Amino acid sequence: MQLSGSISGTAYKMQAEPNILPRKIIIAIDGFSSCGKSTLAKALARKLGYNYIDSGAMYRAVTLFIQQNGITLEELSGMSEEQLEKMLDHIQITFRLNSDSGFSEIYLNDINVEEKIRDLKVSDWVSPVSAIPAIRKRMVRKQQIYGKNKGIVMDGRDIGTKVFPNAELKIFMTASKNVRAKRRFDELTEKGFMVTMDEVSKNIEDRDSKDTTRKESPLRQAEDAVLLDNSNLNQEEQLQFAMDLVSTLKTA
Ligand code: DC
């Protein structure tokens, strides 16, 4: 998927239940950091034969670009709108299907950065980077293009409030802080990142605080979003919860 183009390939044709709904819809999943949004979003996309887009990965890719080019946060915040637009013109983000996993992965200027963007170094900067209006504007525009043909599950912070305010289904996820920190710690260490629980907890707290208090599109539950606290739910239970919501749309 080019920033300006379409998503390449629809995963899960084999296992999907594409006729579960008479028409394609948009599913917006928002919530706090490390709530398992992407796990649920991927499972839903698989079940429905929909595309999945990780909007957080886009902000992470922009952050990685900034770090790779030696731009400091101070320099970034001092940039004019024009300078930011120029910088963004050098950032090409694409999603391409990984045929082994069945999910699309993110590429930054033609390099697969799916793993690299999960580094704590990127996590530490991504909230201030994503708070910059010009960056948000560019990403939101691209996200809206991805949803043009519907049949998409997108997760993030402002999907139900800003990117797709008319999404047919909106889920807002939360979980206790300890559960979230443990999940992210396990995920990172499994991938080989050397992190401590303390670092992970601090990063989550910090991002929650910055994401909910920023001026532009702060993280909040859309009025018509269904709240899902998954502190005590396993992945199957969460998927069932979401599929039950999808089923209610059949007759709506
Ligand atoms: O989903 P994630 O944790 O990978 O997202 C990383 C950061 O990107 C998150 O802390 C805030 C920002 N983000 C955002 O501002 N809007 C989105 N729609 C998605 C992510």
Image: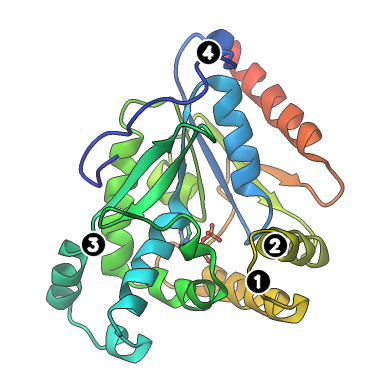
Q: Residues within 10 Å of mark 2 (few under 14, many from 20)?
A: some
Which is more foreground, mark 3 or mark 1?
Answer: 3
Residue 204: mark in rendering: 1
Q: Which residue is mark 3?
A: 91
Question: Distance from label 4 to label 2 (Cα)?
Answer: 31 Å
Q: Position of residue 65 (x, y in %)?
A: 32, 70
Question: Distance from label 3 to label 2 (Cα)?
Answer: 27 Å
Task: Indicate which disc, 1 or 4, sits on the residue closer to the N terminus.
Answer: 4
Element type at marker 4? helix
Q: Which residue is mark 2?
A: 184
Q: Looking at this view, is 225 or 51 the one in front?
A: 51
Which is more foreground, mark 3 or mark 4?
Answer: 3
Q: Any atom of ligand 1 within 8 Å of the CB at mark 1?
A: no
Tell me, yes or no, whether the two marked residues, 3 and 1, touch with CB atoms within 8 Å: no
Question: Height in image: 140 above or below 243?
Answer: below
Question: Distance from label 3 to label 1 (Cα)?
Answer: 26 Å
Q: Residues within 10 Å of mark 1 (few under 14, many from 20)?
A: many
Tell me, yes or no, whether the two marked residues, 1 and 2, touch with CB atoms within 8 Å: yes
In which quadrant is the C terminus drawn?
Answer: top right
Task: Indicate which disc, 3 or 4, sits on the residue closer to the N terminus.
Answer: 4
In this rendering, position of residue 170 left or right of residue 202: left
Q: Residue at 54% across / 36% down in the picture?
A: 101
Question: Distance from label 3 to label 4 (Cα)?
Answer: 34 Å
